[in-house]
Image: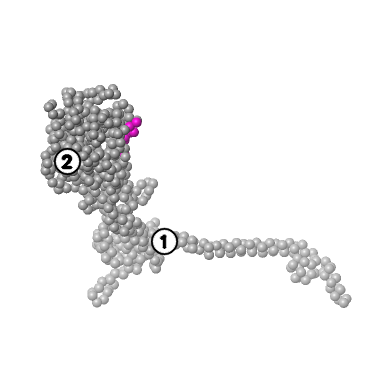
Amino acid sequence: MAHNSSAVGDAARPDVPQPWWQRAQGRGQGPDRAARMATNRRLRFTVIIVLVVALILGGRLLYLQVIRAPALADVAQQFRTASYTQQALRGDIVDTQGTVLATSVPRYNVRADHVALQDYVSYVSDGKEKKIVGVGPAAAAKKLAPVLGVDEARLGGMLLGPSGNNTNQWALIASGLSSDQWQKIKDLGIHGIYPERYMDRVYPNGNTAGNVLGYVGQSAEDPVVRGRAGIESTMDSTLAGQDGSISVEVGPYGTTFPDSERVIKKAVDGREVQLTLDADIQRAAQDVIDAQVSKTRAVWGSAVVLEIGTGAVLALADSASPDPSQLNKTSASNWGIRSVASAVEPGSVGKLMTLSAAIDQKKVNPLTPVNVASSMTMPNGEEISDADYHEAETMTVAGGLAKSYNTAMVQIGDTISDQVRYSYLQKFGLGTPTGIELPAESSGMLRPYNEWGARDHYTTMIGQALSMSTLQLAQMVAVFGQEGMLIPPHIIQGYEDASGIYTPTVVGTAQRVVSKETAQTMLQVMQGVTRDGGTAGEGGRIAGYNVAGKTGTGENADSTGALNNTVTSFVGIVPADKPRVAIAVALYFQGSYIPGAGVPVFQKIGEYAMRDLKVPPSTQPLFEYPWYPTGN
């Protein structure tokens, strides 16, 4: 017992050393107790820090290896993947007969894979066995050089591999090859030679309908090659197709992994679009309008040919039409479609709408007498004058139109109210786009009748104080050949849908403008314009065919707002007895102009259209209403 008491007492004495296991825990007595306790705290703190860090790292590892693993794998895959675009071919644009107006030709760039070519082996066969005649890039160059028409030694150097600062594994060895040229290379069977196909847009007929077709290209804001004007733009989603691609896994410096998978997404080519245009009539119309613009020194000219009864546009011709494949050779001011986008004052052509409205309202008929003079003061005090001086006389309504007397037409127009006449102008399509499948179409200008001033009341009767595009002029005059119905014009005949099935265009709903009887009467009255003494006379005639037409001269503002510019126009239907086409012509002049300059353009286009469409000649004589009342 004494021994145990001594041991306990020793433990309580500060000068007696404590067991190691107590000191390690910072317990017991002794001179180093404070140091041991401090060390113990540091150790506990360190263990806690280590555990926290381990927990964080473990959580991060779990996040990266499990939660984020698929996404990170995709990112890594992207870094290891090189993709090459295979452009889809744009669909063809053809005319109504199937003549190709725009097409895509596949071109090929050829690239060589330096790594793959190291394993290339060239064989020859004697029919029994194959013998090795060469290996590697040198052997490939020997086969390729004759096909490419290049020096074998130089090509061999290109195939050996990158040099200097060039670290690209894929060497471009040829560009712009045709399909036949690429096929010859492909037939060589050289592993490591690959194509890059791209689309080259070609317009086989040059500038024929060039402004209608439009063009394809890129812009600073949009690097994608797409239709930028004309049909190429409005039908881009049908024509464009979908590009394909070739994707491969690559290592450093673009080296392809030998056993990597090649992912090929085939390009889906665009689909065909068929137009209503007749390429031959279109070509003739362009040639005629270009020649007349040059001869008369007009700023520009346009002509439209519509098929009666369908609204199909057979020709939409503008002077100086560009070749879409060589746009830099034509001023950008001529890239647009003026026959659709430029609205001008039609002048006396507009008298057809006034006269037909009065006839349709049964206020006048072709034989109604009307007193005319070179100048007349109207009931509201406005002075109306004719273009040329003539004696005061009494004529029939038919004679007044044939002579295009303003003084006759304003009296005819006064037989109906502005509100009624305005409704007819609207029904003829003024102030509303035709809806043709082309960009930037003008709606023309027609102010509400309650905004007309005292002079507008009369000038709107004679085709002034309003504006129309050449296409709208053709649409308007076609009404008389279509038994009084307005049929919206269209230029898309049909297209292939996504399944490759041909889908014809659904023509817009026809609207009645005037009665069938009024339309027939107008065709008869308009034939007087091409008689001797009419404003068109012999120049508006087409041999073998009766013509119903009307001349026009409209004043247009220059850059200062002054009415110093002029448009001379002509609209007509041929044959007048069995209508097949409606033609509208407009020529724009700055300063001086040539009256009736549009008449010979109509005549030549009409002659060609009759031959091209194989229209039988007229079997009835020209209809001749008397120009003066009986007994005069």
On whether residue 65 falls in the magenta region, the answer is no
Give the camera-side residue of 51 and 141: 51
Q: Which residue is mark 2?
A: 576
Give the camera-side residue of 305 and 217: 305
| Amino acid bearing label 1 | Thr
| Amino acid bearing label 2 | Ala
Q: Which residue is mark 1?
A: 81
Q: Quadrant of the C terminus?
A: top left
Q: Main secondary structure of the magenta part?
A: loop
Left or right: 510 as drawn, with respect to 39: left
* SS assignment at label 1: strand
Looking at the picture, does residue 595 appear above or below residue 178? above
- Crowdedness near tag 2: few (<14), some (14–19) or many (≥20) residues, C-alpha within 10 Å: many
Q: Position of residue 2 (x, y in %)?
A: 88, 76
The magenta segment: 443-450
- Residue at screen point 75% across, 64% down: 36
